[in-house]
Image (cartoon, rainbow, N blue to C red):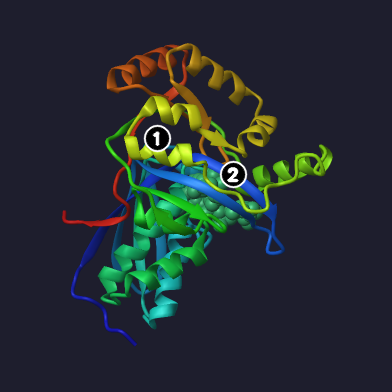
Amino acid sequence: MTSAGSLAAVHARAPGKINVFLKVGALLDDGYHDVAIAYQAVSLYEDVRVHHADDFSVEVAGTVEVSRVPTNGSNIAIKAARLLARKAGYRAGARISITKRVPVAGGMGGGSADAAATLLACDALWGTDLPREELLGLARELGADVPFALTGGTAIGTGRGDQLSPALAKGNFQWVLVLADFGLSTPAVYAELDRHRDRHAQDIFPADPTPTVDTNVLQAIRAGDPHMLAETLHNDLQAPAIHLQPSLAEILELGEQNGALAGVISGSGPTVAFLAADLDGALELQIALSAARMNVVRATGPVHGARIMQD
Ligand SMILES: C[C@@](CO)(OP(=O)(O)O)[C@H](O)COP(=O)(O)OP(=O)(O)OC[C@H]1O[C@@H](n2ccc(N)nc2=O)[C@H](O)[C@@H]1O
Ligand SMILES: Nc1ncnc2c1ncn2[C@@H]1O[C@H](COP(=O)(O)OP(=O)(O)O)[C@@H](O)[C@H]1O
């Protein structure tokens, strides 16, 4: 058994993400789909503070709809802490406090960021000090998006989306995000895509058996060129998300009418991410969408992955 570290508390921060490109391949026997994703970590952060405790507990506050976040053992931060304790042979618990800024069930990986930050924070608090590769392995067990919240930046994810390779990126992209007052369940959106593929000529448009990220996406990110990236934004989960929540189509249209270079639903939605040409463009778009009574926040990307903060 590893002994507890000497720190009284540890603070870790992890970012939300936008999927700038997402292709869904076949449904596998384990219930997951083969995917090809280009992830970008963006400047909406989750702050996680952990304290020594005999048992595991979590409290959640923040600027988003935190009443929708469970505070029992089903919270992914508690799952992360328990998993690390089990793997590292640590016998006590942790009191976890989360400050959320990433929309809940919004397709931006807020829970995954909490899990990644909790892994890092507990690893430091308890002095378990696992090698990076082992932390990434635990992240994979927790969810397909969790490894990316650890690494951040810009990366390509294949397999379940958890086999990562970093992508070269230049500069900063300016995003305007429209947050919904409802969430969408990730499994429900993948299931809607499967139903659609079953209904509509799977034989004519079969799921790509080996989905890949379009090379134009990589080029646009490498060049730091928002106009190029706007041309290549793509998400196979967008149509099923709109089918489940038709109002999302109007939001996409409104953003594009008000100067966005392009818009895309992030992940399984319902957050709509609009790419702006520059900061001025983003500010103008934010004003226009706020005037239309939308809940809007701005973010830039790429940003770093989960890291320990020195308070
Ligand atoms: C859609 C994406 C895009 O980044 O993100 P979100 O919209 O959830 O943020 C991810 O694929 C979600 O990642 P994450 O939310 O970590 O997924 P998990 O908890 O591992 O899986 C939840 C469920 O989603 C479905 N799932 C997830 C990933 C994948 N490659 N194929 C799937 O079919 C499965 O039904 C799975 O049981
Ligand atoms: N720490 C957490 N933060 C947010 N949601 C959580 C958390 N732990 C468990 N959940 C559950 O996971 C679901 C999806 O969470 P979230 O990561 O916010 O969205 P998404 O998967 O769309 O990116 C939520 O609806 C909630 O029930």
Q: Which mark is residue 149?
A: none
Q: Residues within 10 Å of mark 2 (few under 14, many from 20)?
A: many
Q: Which mark is residue 23?
A: 2
Does residue 118 sit above or below 92 in this rendering? above
Q: Earlier in the sequence, mark 1 or mark 2?
A: 2
- Type of amino acid under label 2: Lys
Horizontal side of residue 307 vs 251, given as left or right? left
Residue at which label 1 appears: 220
* Residue at the image point whose x is 30% and y is 22% from the top: 278
Does residue 293 sit above or below 225 in this rendering? above
Circle 1 sits in a helix, a strand or a loop, which is it? helix
Horizontal side of residue 248 vs 307, given as left or right? right
| Quadrant (top left, top right, bottom left, bottom right) of the C terminus | bottom left
Horizontal side of residue 209 vs 154, given as left or right? right
- Type of amino acid under label 1: Ala
| Quadrant (top left, top right, bottom left, bottom right) of the N terminus | bottom left
Q: Residues within 10 Å of mark 1 (few under 14, many from 20)?
A: some
Horizontal side of residue 239 vs 283, given as left or right? right
Instruction: Please say whether residue 116 is visible from this viewpoint.
Output: yes
Residue 238 location, x and y as percent? 61, 34
Instruction: Please say whether residue 69 is visible from this viewpoint.
Output: no
Task: Nearest to the eye among marks 1 and 2: give it.
Answer: 1
Residue 36 location, x and y as percent? 55, 49
Does residue 249 sit above or below 236 in this rendering? above
Viewer-nearest residue: 108 or 163: 163
* Residue at the image point whose x is 45% and y is 12% from the top: 258
